[in-house]
Image (cartoon, grey):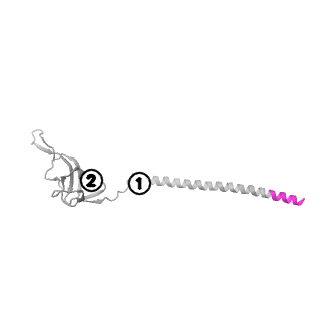
């Protein structure tokens, strides 16, 4: 707790507001529920709400926990209300993978279709090229056969004379 302000609004009783920094919010089972970098709620006795408690922690620990919290569920191994905690006092359990969103599924299907179309296009081009090369080869063979036939005919004609 750092700043204490007193507020008086329209003849209502004076209410004190406290500014808290780097709050670690946890439940009765010591599961970390939330991290709050600033709060001016009226908190007292380390009770955050009906089911949660809070404790202020150093900024460095706050940052370390924040990085873990993005991809893990976190549980404390000791009660921070009773003793000082460190990053070693936190058990991290990786979150299960998120199922893909509808847009991700659509994008994946479109990508797979595009890859399949590309593969089929390459195969079709290969087949077309093979057919064309076969046709050219057949044309050359036919030309050679005509030349051989002509040469045989000429030799046969010369031999008859």
The residue nearer to you, when weighing 3 against 15, is 3
Name the secondary structure under disc 1: helix
The residue nearer to you, when weighing 38 against 102, is 38
Q: Quadrant of the C terminus?
A: bottom right
Residue 152 in the magenta stretch? The answer is yes
Residue 9 percent location from the top left of the image: 12, 39
Q: Is residue 16 above or below residue 150?
A: above
Label 1 crowding class (10 Å Cα cut-off): few <14, some 14-19, many 20+? few
Magenta segment boundaries in residue numbering: 150-161
Name which of mark 2 and mark 1 comes first in the sequence. 2
Q: Name the residue tied to disc 2.
A: 64
Residue 24 percent location from the top left of the image: 21, 53
Farthest top residue? 10
Are the residues flagged by discs 2 and 1 in contact, CB closer than 8 Å?
no
Q: Is residue 32 above or below residue 42?
A: below
Label 2 crowding class (10 Å Cα cut-off): few <14, some 14-19, many 20+? few
Residue 103 left/right relative to 47: right
What mark, if any, has residue 133 been given in the picture? none
Residue 154 left/right relative to 43: right
Could you tell me which residue is drawn at 58 percent across and 53 percent down? Answer: 125
Residue 157 in the magenta stretch? The answer is yes
Name the secondary structure under disc 2: helix
Residue 149 percent location from the top left of the image: 79, 58
Residue 88 percent location from the top left of the image: 24, 59
Could you tell me which residue is drawn at 87 percent across and 60 percent down? Answer: 159
Which dot, 2 or 1, sits closer to the camera? 2
Q: Name the residue tied to disc 1.
A: 105
Within the image, what quadrant is residue 153 found in? bottom right
């Amino acid at each position: 707790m750092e700043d204490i302000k007193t507020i008086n609004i329209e003849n209502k009783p004076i209410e004190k507001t406290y500014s808290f920094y780097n709050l670690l919010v946890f439940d009765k089972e010591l599961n970390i529920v939330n991290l709050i970098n600033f709060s001016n709620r009226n908190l007292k006795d380390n009770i955050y709400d009906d089911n949660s408690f809070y404790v202020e922690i150093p900024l460095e620990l706050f940052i370390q926990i924040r990085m873990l919290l993005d991809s893990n569920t976190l549980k404390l191994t000791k009660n921070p209300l009773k003793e000082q905690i460190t990053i070693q006092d936190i058990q991290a359990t990786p979150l299960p993978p998120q199922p893909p969103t509808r847009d991700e599924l659509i994008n994946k299907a479109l990508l797979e279709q595009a890859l399949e179309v590309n593969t089929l296009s390459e195969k079709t081009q290969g087949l077309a090229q093979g057919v064309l090369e076969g046709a050219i080869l057949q044309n050359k063979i036919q030309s050679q056969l005509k030349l051989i036939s002509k040469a045989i005919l000429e030799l046969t004609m010369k031999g008859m004379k």
